[in-house]
Image (tube, rainbow, N blue to C red):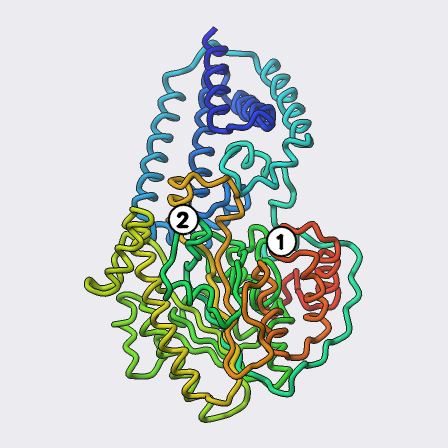
Amino acid sequence: MIPIFILVAAVAAIALTERSVEHLPFAVAAFVFNAALLLLFLADLERPLLLSGMLAVAIAGISSVKFNHSALKLTVSDLPLAFAGTVPFFVLQYPRMMLGVLAGSVLFAVASIAVLLYAAGSPISIAFRIVLFLLALAGFAKASTSKGAMSLRHTLTQGRCFYATFMASLADPACWRQFGALALSDIANEPLPLREATPARSADSPDIIVIQHESVFDPRIFGLPVEPTVEAFLSPPDAEFGRLNVDIFGGGSWQSEFSLLTGLSSASFGSSAYYLFQKGAGRFHSSLPRSLASLGYKTSLISSCRRAFLSYDKFYSSIGVDERIFVDELPPPFDVRRFEATNSDAMFLDAVVDAHIKSVARDPTPRFLYALTNFNHGPHSRQLVPPGQFESERAFAMASFPDVGYAEYYARLAETASAWQRVRAKLASSFPDRPVLIVHYGDHQPVLTKQIDRQLKGLGDGRRAFGTFYAIEALNIPHLSPGKGADLDIAFLGTVALQRAGLALDPIFATRASLLDDCRESYFASASERKRRFHRTLVDLGLIDLMPNARQAR
């Protein structure tokens, strides 16, 4: 009688956490399989059922925490990330959340020990246990091939089926990766013939400045108003602008950098996406910097991080960025210690533009500059904008959405917008005749937008968490048409920048440009067969090395 009561209670708890009738049978099958597996080692029914139910609730809880901070649920592919810097990152950025996870883990461990020691029931013969296990295994295997289980792969951005999604990933070969190798999940067997190279549309080769704005999104995505200065930053009246879809939420900015520079989705590489800068150095031989270098450009990076951060120096060197300047190397009067107290965009962007102006003065060769900011990174419980500055903007934000975290986000955004107006004016006055194309965009949304979405009772659009902004501005480039542009995926933003600059496209970029109509705002999520065949072409041509060679292994 007691085992039946435990079974009913566990199924009820799973149903409450899953919130999906369609996927509940698979979740129950997974629960029964876990219980049957434990039953092989524990001779009674009570303890395996209790432990399996507790495990299901714990997995759902951890997955829910991950979802709230990354907009993606937990899968088995995430487990290696614990050893790739994810846990230390969360401890540093979200200490309260991690303290809660630690407390929950301790409670789970204590409860499990108590169950093992004090909840034993009547013993069952080993023969009967083996039969139950084989039946549960067959049921789980059959459930794993069902339409409901297969559809869980497409629900990673939906706030339900937390336990079922993780258990489905255990049975999904695509979630298991060979150590050291890269694997493309969206690749066809047949290659796609490359397009002919596209000739340049202009005799001029403008400087191209790309600025990645850390954790910046357009509040209007959530129906929140913005002031004129912020509006002019997010959607400049004399520029092309629109919504940008990215692969990440809450962190992992380098995945957006990877996508922009290689024209590929980081999500295509599954569990390797988080550490592509480490595993991918030397494996990607077609990139935006390399294409521009072939057109005679000097390529450079200015990062608000120090040189030792992750594998930035190695990765950027491997994709063709010749000059790499990190924040601890910017010359005076820039003060790195003062800067790192707040990571202020007002300080950093001014230093970036000064460095660019000096580089052009030394050598007038066309330049590609990629600048990475860090000002608006969470948590937004810290007030980085000094008291007395942008107070009216903070009050405006509080009136729009009464949350101190959002008010801090908006105050930082207002400082960035104000700083951008100044540095853009400096660029214009420094280069009255030199053509310059400026692309700036948000790399991902901060965690606080989850709270905004909940309080505003969002419509349940899982992709909204992955929307930021892009704007393409021009100095002395007459052919750029201003106005609202198409929604774009970040994998296309580099290609669009080349098109707007009027530059020639090599066969790789010309083919990628032809995929715009196929994929548009959703590169990875697109079902385009031409995209999958294009990936096969890149691999066949040796432009993506999926297996490490001897030099990379060293």
Q: Is residue 21 left or right of residue 116?
A: right
Q: Which mark is residue 27?
A: none
The residue drawn where x is 54% and y is 90% is 365
Q: CA distance from mark 1 to mark 2?
A: 23 Å
The answer, for residue 449, to whether it is visible in the render is yes
In the image, 245 versus 61, the foreground residue is 245
The residue drawn where x is 71% and y is 53% is 528
**Residue 110's quadrant in the figure?**
top left
The residue singled out by tag 2 in the image is 449
Asked if residue 280 is positioned above or below residue 367 in the image, the reply reads above
Q: Is residue 283 left or right of residue 254?
A: right
The residue singled out by tag 1 in the image is 524
In percent of width and height, residue 445 lies at 44, 54
Q: Secondary structure at mark 2?
A: helix
In the image, 411 versus 291, the foreground residue is 411
Q: Is residue 185 left or right of residue 162?
A: right
Q: Secondary structure at mark 1?
A: loop
In percent of width and height, residue 70 lies at 46, 48
Amino acid carrying label 1: it is Phe
The answer, for residue 368, to whether it is visible in the render is no
Amino acid carrying label 2: it is Thr
- Sequence-earlier tag: 1 or 2: 2
